[in-house]
């Protein structure tokens, strides 16, 4: 089961498919509490482990993937404490970014929640202490990513002004690697990359998460044809409407709304 606040985890589903995952994938989104990026730590810590435990009880997955940086940086241990199945979290790709940068200046795009976390600070301290790490926390980009993914009109200007909040910081003009530290943002990768221009790479954790899942489940990289199973949601919202549309297009097998 792949879990996120909304549609971001679909970027991990797509990595699983492109790595040849051949099992069943169910999807769960906390559409009734979306977005996570502007919620308090107290609210999320109280909600996510409880919700994960309910989802696991209902869907009985072999593995639970928290395909959300905002949730993982806060509630990974809490979720692990509630289940015996393997739980895979999402870690902002700071380490690969530090290896990749030539200018020594890295940009991080995430939710405000993820950037507040000591978890993220610790990653920067451990892996990128020799780099200048600039960041921009955006709730708006999360919404834009979902809207763009279902084909709604999202203007280049809107995306550009978000990117400028990163690149216009002192020293930001030489950023050559941007970490997409929110699973929603790879939905906008091509567009952000076109705006930023050739000298800037955009990286995320999706492929690494998919590899970890395959390893834990003993899946060999193959031409597997993943079966897209049910979608679980926690309530009606604009995010729920977008998720229904996106997952129906992808071929998921219908939705179940659960009470929280
Ligand atoms: N997809 C989530 C993440 O990776 C966050 C989106 C939200 O704010 O709900 O951080």
Image (tube, rainbow, N blue to C red):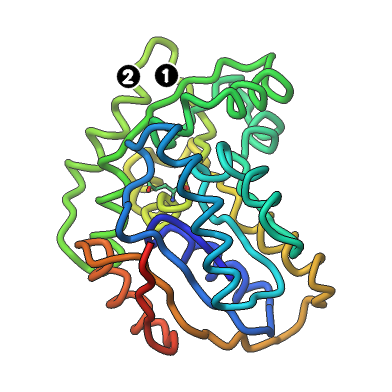
Q: Residue at x 56, y 15 (%)?
A: 132
Q: Which residue is disc 2 drawn over?
A: 168
Occupied quadrant, residue 172:
top left
Quadrant where the N terminus sits is bottom right
- 10 Å crowding of disc 2: few (<14), some (14-19), many (20+): few
Q: Is residue 151 left or right of residue 184?
A: left
Q: Is residue 114 left or right of residue 78?
A: left
168 or 243: which is nearer to us? 243
Q: Which residue is disc 1 drawn over?
A: 172
Residue 131: percent from left, percent from top: 63, 17
Q: Is residue 76 left or right of residue 186?
A: right
Occupied quadrant, residue 151:
bottom left
Q: Residue furthest top?
A: 170
- Depicted 42 relative to depicted 230: above or below: above
Q: Is residue 64 left or right of residue 112?
A: right
Residue 143: percent from left, percent from top: 26, 50
Residue 163 visible somewhere in the drawing: yes
144 or 240: which is nearer to us? 240
Badge 1 element = helix
Gap between marks 2 and 1 measured at Cα: 6 Å
- Depicted 55 relative to depicted 162: above or below: below
Badge 2 element = loop
Q: Residue at x 68, y 18 (%)?
A: 125
Callout 2 touching callout 1 (CB < 8 Å): yes
Say whether mark 2 is within 8 Å of ligand 1.
Answer: no
Quadrant where the C terminus sits is bottom left
Q: Residue at x 41, y 55 (%)?
A: 5
Residue 34: percent from left, percent from top: 32, 52
């Amino acid at each position: 089961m792949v879990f996120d606040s909304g549609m971001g985890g679909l970027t991990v589903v797509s990595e699983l498919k492109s790595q040849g995952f051949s099992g069943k994938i169910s999807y769960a989104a906390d559409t009734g509490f979306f977005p996570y990026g502007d919620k308090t730590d107290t609210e999320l810590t109280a909600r996510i482990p409880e919700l994960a435990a309910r989802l696991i009880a209902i869907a009985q997955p072999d593995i639970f993937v928290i395909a959300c940086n905002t949730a993982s940086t806060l509630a990974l241990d809490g979720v692990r404490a509630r289940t015996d199945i393997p739980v895979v979290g999402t870690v902002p790709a700071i380490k690969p970014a530090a290896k990749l940068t030539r200018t020594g200046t890295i940009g991080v795009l995430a939710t405000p929640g993820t950037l507040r976390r000591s978890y993220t600070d610790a990653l920067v301290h451990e892996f990128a202490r020799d780099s200048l790490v600039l960041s921009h926390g955006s709730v708006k980009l999360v919404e834009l990513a979902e809207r763009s993914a279902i084909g709604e009109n999202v203007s280049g200007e809107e995306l550009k002004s978000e990117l400028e909040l990163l690149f216009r910081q002192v020293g930001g003009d030489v950023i050559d690697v941007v970490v997409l530290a929110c699973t929603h943002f790879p939905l906008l990768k091509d567009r952000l990359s076109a705006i930023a221009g050739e000298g800037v790479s955009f990286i995320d954790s999706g492929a690494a998460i998919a590899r970890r899942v395959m390893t834990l489940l003993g899946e060999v990289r193959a031409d597997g044809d993943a079966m897209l199973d049910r979608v679980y949601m926690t309530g009606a919202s604009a995010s729920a409407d977008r998720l229904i549309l996106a997952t129906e297009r992808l071929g998921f097998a219908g939705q179940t709304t659960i009470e929280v």
